[in-house]
């Protein structure tokens, strides 16, 4: 575990010392405050509008950050050649990948926590209320969705450069979030082989929509019952682990091409 | 004498068989030797090192370090490695880099602190230890990378072109470090294009060409008295002297 934590610690230090993260945080924070403060059609005073806009921003921001942070870690190590001294130590490739995933994910969920605190703070300042348990559940499930996105992004980055991995992750996860949930409706209008293929896709794709509790938080529907919450959490953990294993399978025998391999 | 490195019938093929980087290579490096690994560009020197460190998997054959198969991470417990053109995390300070390297070897905190001071002194970079690596010169970068390779007090040090790009003082310092390691009974396995460097520090040599060992043995036995290593190297590779060489 020490080795995994050491790799995660390096990811944190890099993020904190390279100033781009602060710029991103400040920009998105400012954007969030502007969106929340706007008084569109006189809705500015409505607390639900504030919650909706704030949580939407937190989701978009978290998603972008998860993809960008986790897709760049491995390609950057390889192109700079910093991977060589690392893997020359008694560090397995699984530990390396796990450390990178843990580091990226913990950064993303920490930044997302700041956003939740900011949204809840503004709601309370406007005289509204947020059910603490529902909001915490929403945050935890949001974190689990981010773990899945980070793991998918890292899996792509084991065999692609950063840009390609980020693009593939956006296509894959956005499809999973917005389109997969509509497949049962589409299946109503199809039959035969096409319907079977749709069914397979529906079952194979990650169901990221399950982690989205925004509506419950916005409209105060109350928290999820414990069994459902635990089931979704377990599903997210398994999904993240599955993509971590896929990363490992893609990475365990990878040949590195930097430098003169035939030197 | 037991062996630090054992390589048997090692073959590495790239690009689906189009490039044969190593061809049935056999090599044994005894413990305590300073072993110079020579060869022209593309001979396969780095490939051998990368197989030993499990960066690439051999197509066939076997490689062992202190008796452990290189595929197991435990084989790297007693190794220190300095890559060619080393680069590292520039956002860290030298001391932080060494702390990170020590944690990967699971060295305890107190022992690690003492070891960091030791390797910083050994590599002559203690004054810059608390500075960001981004501010280091090329020579300092080489030294801090060497320091992280020595953090676990390795019994086998693998150096890929350790003096490349260094000024004469930097080269001399690296030579001194290698000699000190040799005096401590460590095994040093290194590749170099600087034949004069190799001549000064190595007790064993192997010349590699097109993935095969052309010649190998104790340096004093291979190179005839009065002959330079450069001439021996050319002779071993079958390179005919040019008019320029004859004029010299």
Image (cartoon, rainbow, N blue to C red):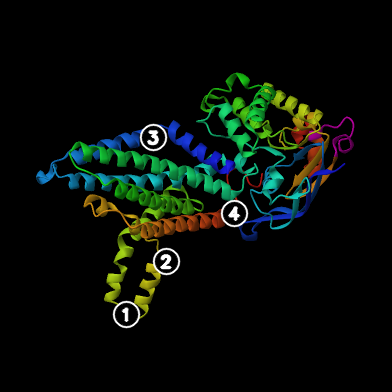
Instruction: Mark 1 or mark 4: name the one nearer the start of the chain.
Output: 1
Could you tell me how far apart the alpha carbons at marks 1 and 2 are, in whole angstroms?
A: 19 Å
Q: Is residue A47 visible?
A: yes
Could you tell me how far apart the alpha carbons at marks 3 and 2 are, in whole angstroms?
A: 36 Å
Q: Which residue is mark 2?
A: A204
Q: Which residue is mark 3?
A: A20
Q: Are marks 2 and 4 in contact (CB under 8 Å)?
A: no
Mark 3, chain letter? Answer: A
In the image, which residues are magenta?
A: B218-230
- Using the image, tell me which numbered label, if any, was put on residue A191: 1
Q: In which image quadrant can residue A104 be found? A: top left
Mark 1, chain letter? Answer: A
Instruction: Mark 3 or mark 2: name the one nearer the start of the chain.
Output: 3
In-image side of B23 versus B137 (left or right): right
Q: Are marks 1 and 2 in contact (CB under 8 Å)?
A: no
Secondary structure under the numbered disc 4 in the rendered image: loop
Q: Which residue is mark 4?
A: A252
Secondary structure under the numbered disc 3 in the rendered image: helix
Name the residue located 62 percent from the left edge and 28 percent from the top edge.
B144
């Amino acid at each position: 575990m020490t080795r995994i934590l050491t790799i995660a610690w390096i990811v944190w230090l890099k993020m904190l010392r390279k100033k781009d993260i602060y710029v991103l945080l400040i920009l998105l924070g400012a954007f969030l405050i502007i969106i929340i403060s706007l008084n569109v059609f006189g809705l500015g005073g409505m607390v639900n509008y504030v919650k909706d806009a704030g949580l939407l921003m937190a989701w978009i921001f978290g998603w972008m950050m998860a993809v960008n942070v986790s897709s760049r870690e491995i390609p950057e190590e390889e192109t700079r050649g910093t991977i060589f001294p690392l893997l020359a130590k008694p560090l397995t490739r699984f530990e390396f990948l796990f450390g990178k995933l843990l580091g990226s994910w913990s950064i993303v969920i920490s930044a997302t926590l700041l956003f939740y605190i900011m949204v809840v703070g503004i709601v309370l300042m406007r005289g509204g209320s947020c059910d603490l348990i529902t909001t915490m559940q929403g945050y935890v499930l949001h974190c689990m969705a981010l773990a899945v996105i980070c793991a998918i992004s890292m899996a792509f980055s084991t065999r692609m450069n950063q840009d390609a991995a980020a693009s593939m992750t956006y296509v894959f996860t956005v499809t999973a979030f917005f389109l997969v949930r509509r497949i049962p409706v589409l299946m109503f209008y199809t039959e035969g082989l096409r319907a079977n293929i749709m069914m397979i896709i529906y079952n194979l794709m990650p169901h990221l929509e399950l982690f989205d509790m925004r509506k419950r938080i916005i409209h105060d529907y109350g928290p999820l019952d414990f069994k459902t919450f635990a089931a979704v959490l377990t599903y997210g953990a398994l999904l993240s682990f599955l993509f971590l294993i896929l990363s490992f399978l893609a990475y365990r025998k990878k040949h590195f091409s930097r430098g003169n391999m035939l030197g | 004498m037991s062996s630090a490195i054992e390589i048997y019938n090692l073959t590495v093929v790239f690009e689906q068989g189009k490039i044969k980087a190593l061809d049935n290579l056999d090599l044994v490096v005894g413990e305590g030797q300073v072993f110079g690994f020579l060869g022209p560009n593309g001979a396969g020197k780095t490939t051998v090192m990368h197989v030993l460190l499990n960066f690439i998997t051999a197509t066939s054959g076997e490689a062992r370090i202190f008796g452990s198969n290189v595929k197991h991470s435990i084989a790297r417990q007693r190794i220190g490695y300095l890559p060619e053109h080393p680069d590292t995390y520039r956002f860290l300070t030298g001391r932080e880099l060494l702390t990170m390297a020590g944690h990967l070897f699971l060295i305890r905190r107190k022992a690690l602190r003492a070891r960091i001071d030791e390797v910083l002194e050994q590599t002559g970079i203690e004054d810059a230890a608390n500075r960001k690596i981004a501010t280091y010169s090329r020579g300092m970068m080489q030294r801090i990378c060497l320091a992280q390779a020595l953090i676990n007090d390795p019994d086998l040090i693998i150096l890929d072109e350790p003096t490349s790009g260094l000024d004469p003082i930097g080269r001399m310092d690296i030579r001194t470090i290698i000699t000190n390691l040799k005096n401590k009974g460590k095994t040093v396995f290194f590749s170099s294009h600087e034949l004069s460097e190799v001549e000064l520090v190595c007790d064993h040599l192997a010349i590699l060409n097109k993935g095969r060992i052309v010649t190998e043995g104790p340096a004093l036995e291979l190179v005839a008295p009065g002959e330079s290593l450069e001439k021996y190297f050319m002779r071993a590779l079958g390179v005919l002297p040019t008019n320029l060489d004859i004029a010299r």
